[in-house]
Amino acid sequence: MNFAAAADELHRQELARLDATMTPRIEVLRSMTGDGLGDELAGMFERLDHAVITTRPELVTVKAGRK
């Protein structure tokens, strides 16, 4: 078994997982298109256990039965 290759793959997966949970810097958010910003905001709400109903034209979420 190639432990170095397995360790490299595990490290890559962990970095990808951490990157997916990070909120982008304000400069990145400011430079996004409307669609990209809506998608990013929807992802943020999903990480906070909201169910996203729509993202356009308005972001609508539900959590604990409340919109």
Image: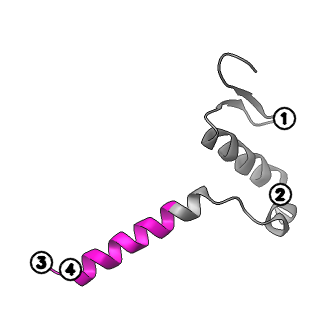
Residue 54 appears at what percent x and percent y? Answer: 73, 31
- Asked if the residues shown at circle 4 and circle 3 are in contact, with their CB atoms under 8 angstroms apart, the answer is yes
Q: Residues within 10 Å of mark 1 (few under 14, many from 20)?
A: few
Q: Which residue is mark 1?
A: 57
| Residue extending farthest right | 30
Q: CA distance from mark 4 to mark 1?
A: 49 Å
Q: Which residue is mark 2?
A: 33
Q: Specify the label residue 1 is tagged with.
A: 3
Q: Residues within 10 Å of mark 2 (few under 14, many from 20)?
A: few
Q: Amino acid at mark 1?
A: Pro
Q: Specify the label residue 3 is tagged with.
A: 4
Disc 4 secondary structure class = helix
Disc 1 secondary structure class = loop
Among numbered discs 1 and 3, the one appearing first in the sequence: 3
Residue 36 vertical position relative to residue 51 in the rendered view, above or below:
below
Among numbered discs 4 and 1, the one appearing first in the sequence: 4
Instruction: Tell me which residue sits at (76%, 21%) in the image.
Output: 67
